[in-house]
């Protein structure tokens, strides 16, 4: 086992991998709660039952899609990266496709399935890996730093340290809020342990925060430990009925499929590059076994759509596990096991609240933004696209938008600087694609 996962080469061990895998799970366990609420449109009143997906079935589909994807990533990709239905893509699925376009959730699942098949074909052909490796190293560093700021922003929002402000868009929240104080306490504890060099500090910080939350009645103890696993029958295989429905074959649905394909590709590519950079797994500006990692993502999305959930993708929260010491695919297997166990121990997830995970996200952002120091800021043609990539992610609340902004400006500034020979031909293709993205696919 140690030889297969290259423990000695990566300087890791079972303890680090297990703690890393558990940390990743805790950091992304919220998806087991959020995804069913999103896909069932739980916060929208007055909708007929046929418009809503079954909550229990979506919960099981979410857990199984995450488990399958993480197992494939761990065994084949050998990366400490877990997968689950992606945030943002699930909102697009529910609010844009189903609620906005009026498509049935069965049609939306079919669109996810088709986009995943395209993903798989691109991966098998090797084109997907070539596209990622064509990205210049400066932009890869910028993507990592941008995602660091993005995930820190998410953590600050979850902790209610940063809140919506009508005058300035965002502002400082009420720091006397009990949940905010709990998150600040967790952040302080985690920072102290990190500064002292405690291995697994992010994970232990979460545990201490949970204990404090329960002690001060800010987190309710779980009502019970084990519950019955809901049936997946309402959603399992439901997408296949769409292929016999003539209303599925429309230009609007084609646009939806392309949007799923486009956003997932660049969100996933950015996540893989960022986490691999943080873990020190990049070699000569290339992602080893990139094809295998991308294969895991493709299969996970296909399987997830059959189970009954939106696009499954690599999770940036995996960086929390990396921060706790994870370096190999064994950590992904640990995370997968946690998702399987979560099917039976769902009530326990109620104690993993936003204030508990917020400190982990903030700390991970600190670690990831360090890649900003590897960018040559003295070269303006590099500084502009790198800066736009970094700043656009948190401000637009979209990893894909940040990547798009940087990739559009990169060939422009490089050409003007007389560095045409340094531009990989594929970057011109990205330039055109991202222009079309802003013109046709953004709302």
Image (cartoon, rainbow, N blue to C red):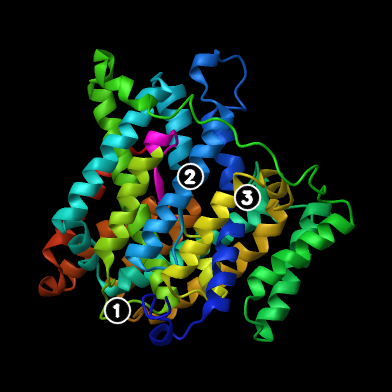
Using residue 374 as the reference point, say whether residue 183 is left or right of it. right
Q: Residue at x 37, y 48 (%)?
A: 300
Mark yes or no: residue 135 visible. Answer: yes
Q: Quadrant location of residue 41?
A: top right
Q: Residue at x 65, y 69 (%)?
A: 203
Position of the C terminus, as image quadrant, is top left
Q: In terms of depth relative to the viewer, which is nearer, 367 or 28? A: 28
Task: Give the mark nearest the N terminus, 2 or 3.
Answer: 2
Task: Give the mark nearest the N terminus, 2 or 1.
Answer: 2
Marks 1/3: CA distance?
32 Å
Q: Is residue 281 magenta?
A: no
Judge whether 226 appears above or below 155 on screen: above
Marks 2/3: CA distance?
36 Å
Q: Which residue is mark 3?
A: 170
Q: Quadrant location of residue 129?
A: bottom left
Q: Secondary structure at mark 2?
A: helix
Residue bounds of the magenta highlight = 305-314
Which label sits on residue 56? none
Q: Is residue 309 magenta?
A: yes
Label 1: how many residues lie within 10 Å, few (<14), some (14-19) or many (20+)? few
Q: Residue at x 59, y 71 (%)?
A: 19
Which label sits on residue 379? 1
Q: Position of residue 178 (x, y in %)?
A: 84, 53
Q: Which residue is mark 2?
A: 64
Q: In terms of depth relative to the viewer, which is nearer, 193 or 393? A: 193
Q: Quadrant location of residue 250?
A: top left
Marks 2/1: CA distance?
47 Å
Q: Secondary structure at mark 3?
A: strand
Using residue 270 as the reference point, say whether residue 391 is left or right of it. right
Judge whether 393 appears above or below 59 on screen: below
Task: Give the mark nearest the N terminus, 1 or 3.
Answer: 3
Judge whether 210 appears above or below 12 on screen: above
């Amino acid at each position: 086992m140690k030889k297969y996962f290259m423990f000695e080469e990566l300087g890791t061990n079972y303890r680090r991998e297990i703690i890393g895998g558990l940390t990743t799970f805790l950091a992304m366990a919220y998806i087991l709660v959020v995804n069913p609420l999103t896909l069932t449109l739980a916060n929208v009143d007055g909708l007929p039952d046929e418009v809503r997906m079954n909550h229990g079935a979506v919960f099981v589909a979410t857990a199984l899609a995450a488990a399958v994807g993480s197992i494939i990533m761990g065994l084949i990709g050998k990366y400490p990266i877990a997968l689950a239905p992606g945030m943002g893509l699930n909102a697009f699925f529910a609010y844009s496709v189903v609620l906005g376009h009026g498509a049935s959730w069965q049609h939306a699942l079919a669109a996810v399935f088709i986009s995943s098949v395209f993903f798989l074909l691109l991966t098998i052909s090797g084109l997907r890996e070539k596209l990622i490796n064509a990205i210049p190293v400066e932009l890869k560093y910028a993507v990592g730093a941008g995602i660091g700021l993005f995930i820190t922003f998410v953590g600050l929002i979850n902790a209610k340290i940063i809140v919506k402000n009508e005058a300035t868009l965002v502002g400082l929240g009420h720091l006397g809020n009990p949940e905010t104080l709990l998150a600040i306490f967790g952040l302080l504890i985690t920072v102290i342990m990190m500064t002292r060099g405690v291995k697994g500090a992010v994970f232990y910080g979460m545990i201490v925060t949970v204990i404090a939350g329960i002690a001060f009645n800010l987190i309710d103890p779980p009502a019970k430990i084990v519950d019955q696993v809901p049936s997946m029958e309402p959603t399992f295989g439901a997408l296949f009925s769409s292929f016999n429905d003539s209303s599925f074959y429309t230009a609007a649905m084609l646009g939806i499929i392309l949007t799923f394909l486009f956003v997932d590709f660049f969100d996933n590519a950015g996540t893989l590059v960022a986490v691999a950079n943080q873990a020190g797994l990049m070699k000569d500006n290339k992602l080893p076994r990139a094809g295998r990692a991308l294969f895991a993502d493709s299969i996970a999305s296909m399987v997830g759509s059959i189970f009954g959930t939106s696009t499954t993708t690599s999770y940036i929260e995996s960086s929390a596990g990396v921060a706790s010491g994870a370096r190999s695919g064994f950590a992904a297997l640990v995370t997968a096991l946690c998702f399987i166990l979560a099917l039976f121990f769902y009530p326990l997830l109620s104690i993993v609240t936003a204030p508990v995970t917020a400190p982990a996200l903030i700390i991970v952002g600190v670690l990831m933004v360090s890649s900003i120091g590897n960018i040559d800021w003295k070269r303006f043609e590099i500084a502009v696209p790198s800066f736009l990539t970094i700043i656009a992610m948190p401000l637009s609340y979209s990893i894909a938008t940040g990547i798009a902004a940087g990739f559009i400006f990169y060939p422009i500034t490089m050409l003007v600087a007389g560095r045409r020979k340094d531009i990989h031909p594929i970057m011109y293709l990205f330039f055109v694609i991202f222009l079309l993205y802003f013109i046709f696919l953004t709302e």
